[in-house]
Image (cartoon, rainbow, N blue to C red):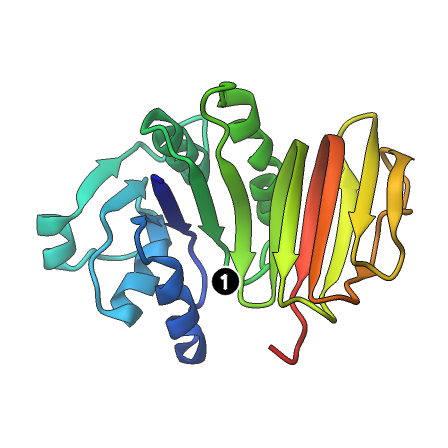
Amino acid sequence: MKRFVIFLPGPYRRTRIGYFKKLCRSARTVAVDGGCRFFMAADFVPDIIIGDLDSIRSIPRRFKAQSLLLTHSPDKDKSDLHLALEYAMGEKARAVDIVSPVIDEVDHFLGNVMLLELIDRMATSAVMPKVRIVAPDYEILWVHDSSRSFSDCAGDRLSVIPMSAAIKLTCRGTEYPAERIRIGRGHSRGLRNRIIRGRASVTIEGKALLVHYFSPLK
């Protein structure tokens, strides 16, 4: 599987570096502009650096020597993450993890979440990658006419936010099970469902964001 891990700008706490490094195993690593700070803190070189480089003062010399550097003008029409996702899709990515260490500027974060649909629109029936925004406390997944399964997850929380005009939702292993219930866009019925079993699954007919909050006990 060709998997990409894309690191966005933000503060990377020392206590969480180990978690982020695990995500990089067997993956092509991408630093989006100030996302280089993660690689500086973790002391290893990203495979790719992409962006207008306006969020970081200087790139370490060894990064310049060993990374594929894809620079763009600050006057471009697309965000750095947008360009990184287009690159990953051009490389036929099968899975894409977007690492967002914090929710900082709300407009920027919401824009990044909406970019999850970009991969869905660019994908083909032959290559439909799994894509998510991930942090130590949560993951946000784009789900389109498909299922997601979860294991070792009792106590975690799931929220389903319809992106189609309406979806049909099936949940198993949750406090509030569902069998193809219809939820319209803008309705809150899919929010805050707790996982009560070791394994759970969610099936969505239509397009939706699936927000998975990890239990604090993990």
Residue 166 placed where, x, y %? Answer: 85, 28
* Left or right for 21, reference 203: left
Is the residue marked by circle 1 packed among few (<14), some (14-19), or many (20+) residues within 10 Å?
Answer: many
Residue 141 placed where, x, y %? Answer: 61, 45
In the rendered image, which quarter is residue 180 located in? top right
**Up-down: is 114 above or below 30?**
above
Which residue corresponds to the image point at 81% horizontal and 42% vertical from the top-left? 170
| Residue nearer the viewer, 3 or 101 | 3
In the rendered image, which quarter is residue 35 located in? bottom left
The N terminus appears in which quarter of the rendering?
A: top left
Q: Secondary structure at mark 1?
A: loop
| Residue nearer the viewer, 64 or 15 | 15
Which residue corresponds to the image point at 43% horizontal and 52% vertical from the top-left? 8
> Amino acid under label 1?
Pro
Q: Which residue is mark 1?
A: 101
**Up-down: is 77 above or below 102?**
above
Residue 185 placed where, x, y %? Answer: 85, 33
